[in-house]
Amino acid sequence: MPVMDRNYRRMPVVLKGATRFSDEPQLADELWAVRELKRHQRWLDKLLTDTDLERNWGRPRLPGHWALAYLAFVGSRQVDIEPWWAMSSAEVWLECGFSAKPSYQAVWKRFAELEQTTGAFHEAATLVIRRAVRKSDGKVGRAIHIDATEAETNAVLAHDCRDGEACARQARRRARGLPLRVGRLHADDERARRHARHDKEVEAEDAATAEAMRDVVYDSERSVLRMRRGGCWYRTRDATAGYRIYMQGAHIKKGWFGFLDHKVIDHYTGGTLLHKFEKATVQDYHTYPELLDGVIETLGRTPVAMMADRGLATRSVYELTTRKGIATVIPSRGRRATDQDSYDRHGIPRCRHCGGETHFVRFNHQPTPRLWVRCLIPSQPGCQREQTISCSTDWKRLLPLWRTEPAYAAYRQAHQTYERVHHHQRQRYKVAGDTHAIRPKRIGVGCQQLRANPAGLIEWLRIRHREGWLGCPRTNRDDEFVRTTPGYHGPPPADPAEVPF
């Protein structure tokens, strides 16, 4: 692979039009990805080997490749299996290696079995992505965006107080003829509440989550998860989903049940490098270490910069990212930063001899992350020499890419534009459904992850086709451009009352 440029101050580059698949209607064909994958035998063999669930006992299965059939199912933009199976033509099944159209029961069962092999589709996508890294001279994966969006489960939270468990609510609601279940909170409302919580302290969020998870048991006889909240017991069929419950006084008002789809998005092309589904009760910063290791494994190298929203603005995230040699670009939350003796409120080190400003010399994350600087206006004999400061002094302030750099401002401003990826994933592949119309009717996190990983494979096959990285002519008529920030003049000045000297 080409050597990745580790210049943190270089302005970010964007490849315009890489994911504008509407310019080529043939890419919307449900069999396009299947046929394209069959042109590359190495990728095809990897996928078919990892998804082979054939056993040496029992009745022989129908000859054919169920992984390719599922790839066609995702490419069709259908949410449920039955309508897709009813409308599928003989051409689809012949292209996937079947001699005839299987029964609906066989298709449903084999697709459900593929949930055991969700990683196989991502492994195949990894081969495609790494080729894209080489063809782009290391620009793919140089900078990444991390964000999460809501994905609903098809289960509900129903009242489940039994005989002997004191519950006045049950008698009141039955007398009034009201349903004994919690109203579902729409994902848009949940998103607004979750973003508002980003401005609170992390410790308060963890305490609220621990309180919500109190008295949770699994009823194996009925295969339901039971939880007590507000003096009542509730049940849900999806034991893999997380829940967020909103109280009104001592009673539950509404609830939201499902998962968070954590995405790693490539800054250069806008393609999704990795999906990771977690239950909604797991905070973003707890999923981050596994997510970062996963994208490094996918790219085969370490990114230069990582962008995220306030949900990841914690000390542990800054420390882990800096230790891996990655520049962190995240808006601050909590109390406003103030100047310190050794660095200012923006994280710019002070000269230890004259206390003046310094300019960046270099950064090294091994064996421990450190910054080397030099005094900007030397006035003392010691100002001429290079000075160093450990990033562990303040992980959230002392960063490889300083907040006063134009590249930092360009990265931070660009993060909001990649919110569109959540919409594209739902419209193009029906991933992370947030309404009844597009959420899968099969419950469980495995179903959600299985839908997302083939979508990533299809997307990167399309990107490589548009950029001519598959050995075909380039069809994308747009060129790359350097993202800038017009009118940027550095961070805003702090309140003089906050400066201690």
Image (cartoon, helix red, strand yellow):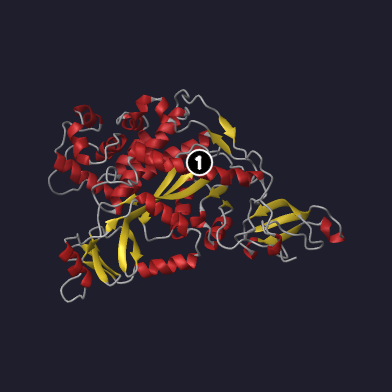
Residue beneath the point at 55% across and 39% down: 138
In this rendering, is residue 139 above or below 472? below
Displayed quadrant of residue 396: bottom right
Residue closer to the observer: 257 or 112: 257
Residue furthest to the front in view is 176
Residue furthest to the left in view is 59
Question: Helix or strand or loop: what does disc 1 sit on?
Answer: helix
Expressed as whole percent of the image width and height from the top left, the position of residue 356 reads 79, 58
In this rendering, is residue 488 above or below 319? above
Q: Is residue 283 visible?
A: yes
> Where does the C terminus fall, quadrant-wise?
bottom right
Expressed as whole percent of the image width and height from the top left, the position of residue 258 reads 32, 55
In this rendering, is residue 421 above or below 370? above
What is the crowding at mark 1: few (fewer than 14 residues within 10 Å), some, or many (at least 20)?
few
Q: Is residue 126 visible?
A: no
Residue beneath the point at 23% across and 63% down: 235
Residue beneath the point at 16% across and 31% down: 100
Residue beneath the point at 41% across and 52% down: 191
Expressed as whole percent of the image width and height from the top left, the position of residue 302 reads 54, 48
Residue closer to the observer: 8 or 346: 346
Residue closer to the observer: 259 or 317: 259
Total marks in image: 1
- Kind of residue sitting beneath label 1: Thr
Residue closer to the observer: 42 or 34: 34
Expressed as whole percent of the image width and height from the top left, the position of residue 305 reads 57, 48
Residue hosting label 1:
417
